[in-house]
């Protein structure tokens, strides 16, 4: 099955109707294997795309499928900063953003950041994931052995970058993602520790607060209650941080689907989808496509939190 770098549109809780762009498209192995990563299986591809090719594919998807987007979200199989031509790509995408009226958001763990001034000038938002769960840091992020990275080193590097680029603080938002493996009552000690790091070491100006709404790489992770999210929001607000609790929105965009089989596949290898999402985004052709993918053993069905989801096989 062909792996393509443009996927979606996706009904994002924090960014509205968003089209995903994965510039690396599984050509580079991510040095981190995060428990919260929405990509459930590992893929590999030899096809690399130039900035010009990626720009063309994004514009084709918008115009041919008549998409009305709020955000172009740059994220996917590995940190976008591992894409060597990222500054050039963002320059081209910024022009598209002006033409079609969407915001440009890039998700990164910041550890591999380079040419950061150029990137921050181009994007509307730089989104940094911050995970909270009843798990140790090394389990949540699982860095490759050759990276030789500890929690202290990781947070210190983030703090150093944020201090150096504090003039861009309004563009840098932390995506605070909360889950649990055990009982919610066992989460408190971990929660207090991670929130303390966020507030007093990283010192963000803004945070999106949310829990899991679909399965992630570590299938044992489950969502937390609204009261836990509210507790975190209160702590952030007390310290002067703008806290936004993101919740699921209705599907506000329906794409014209000319290649539903490929489009749905390239969506679920980055984000598992519910039946209602597939129908809402891709229509009846989407359901036919996903069932065909299941019959060909390219996708499978799972039950997570009493809901049916489609994920890739493998």
Image (spheres, rainbow, N blue to C red):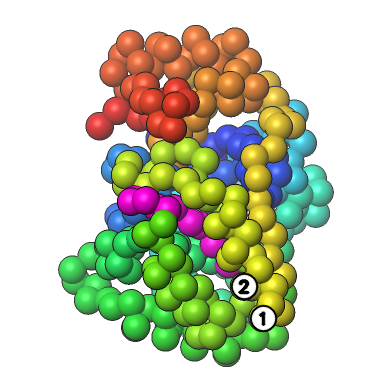
Q: Residues within 10 Å of mark 2 (few under 14, many from 20)?
A: some
Q: Nearer the viewer, residue 221 or 234?
A: 234
User: In the picture, which quadrant includes the C terminus?
Assistant: top left
Q: Which residue is mark 1?
A: 239
Q: Is residue 174 magenta?
A: yes
Residue at the spot 42% in from the left edge and 12% down from the top edge: 291
Verify CB contact (< 8 Å) between mark 1 and mark 2: yes
Residue 29: x and y, percent?
30, 55
Q: Position of residue 143 (x, y in %)?
A: 27, 66
Query: Tag 1's secondary structure?
Result: loop
Quadrant containing the N terminus in the rendered view = top left
Q: Position of residue 135 (x, y in %)?
A: 32, 62
Closer to the camera in the image, 241 or 103: 241
Residue in the foreground of this view, choosing between 51 and 199 = 199
Q: Is residue 221 found left or right of 230 in the rendered image?
A: left
Quadrant of the rendered image containing residue 116: bottom right
Picture quadrant where residue 152 is located: bottom left
Residue 255: image quadrant is top right
**Residue plotted at (53% across, 66% down):** 128
Identify residue for label 2.
235
Instruction: Read off the magenta span.
Output: 171-184
Task: State the residue at coordinates (55%, 57%).
Answer: 228
174 relative position to 99: left or right: left
């Amino acid at each position: 099955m062909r792996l393509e770098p443009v996927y979606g549109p996706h009904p994002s809780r924090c960014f509205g109707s968003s089209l995903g762009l994965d510039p690396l498209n599984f050509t580079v192995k991510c040095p981190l294997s995060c428990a919260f990563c929405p990509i459930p299986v590992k893929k590999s591809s030899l096809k690399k795309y130039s900035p010009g090719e990626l720009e063309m594919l994004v514009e084709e998807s918008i115009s041919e499928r008549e998409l009305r987007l709020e955000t172009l979200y740059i994220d996917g199989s590995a940190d976008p900063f591992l894409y060597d031509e990222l500054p050039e790509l963002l320059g081209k995408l910024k022009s598209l953003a002006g033409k079609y009226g969407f915001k440009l958001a890039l998700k990164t763990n910041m550890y591999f950041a380079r040419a950061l001034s150029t990137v921050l000038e181009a994007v509307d938002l730089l989104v940094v994931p911050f995970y909270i769960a009843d798990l140790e840091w090394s389990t949540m992020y699982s860095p490759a052995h050759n990276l030789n990275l500890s929690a202290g080193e990781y947070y210190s590097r983030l703090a150093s970058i944020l201090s150096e680029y504090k003039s861009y603080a309004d563009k840098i938002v932390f995506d605070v993602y909360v889950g649990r493996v055990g009982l919610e009552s066992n989460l408190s000690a971990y929660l207090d520790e991670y929130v303390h790091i966020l507030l007093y070491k990283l010192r963000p100006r803004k945070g999106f607060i949310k829990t899991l709404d679909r399965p992630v790489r570590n299938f044992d992770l489950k969502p937390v209650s609204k009261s836990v999210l509210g507790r975190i929001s209160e702590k952030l607000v007390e310290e002067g941080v703008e806290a936004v609790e993101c919740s699921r929105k209705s599907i506000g965009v329906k794409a014209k689907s000319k290649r539903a089989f490929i489009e749905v596949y390239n969506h679920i290898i980055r984000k598992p989808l519910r039946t209602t999402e597939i129908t809402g985004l891709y229509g009846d052709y989407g359901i036919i496509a996903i069932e065909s993918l299941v019959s060909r053993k390219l996708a499978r069905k799972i039950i997570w939190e009493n809901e049916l989801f489609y994920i890739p096989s493998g």
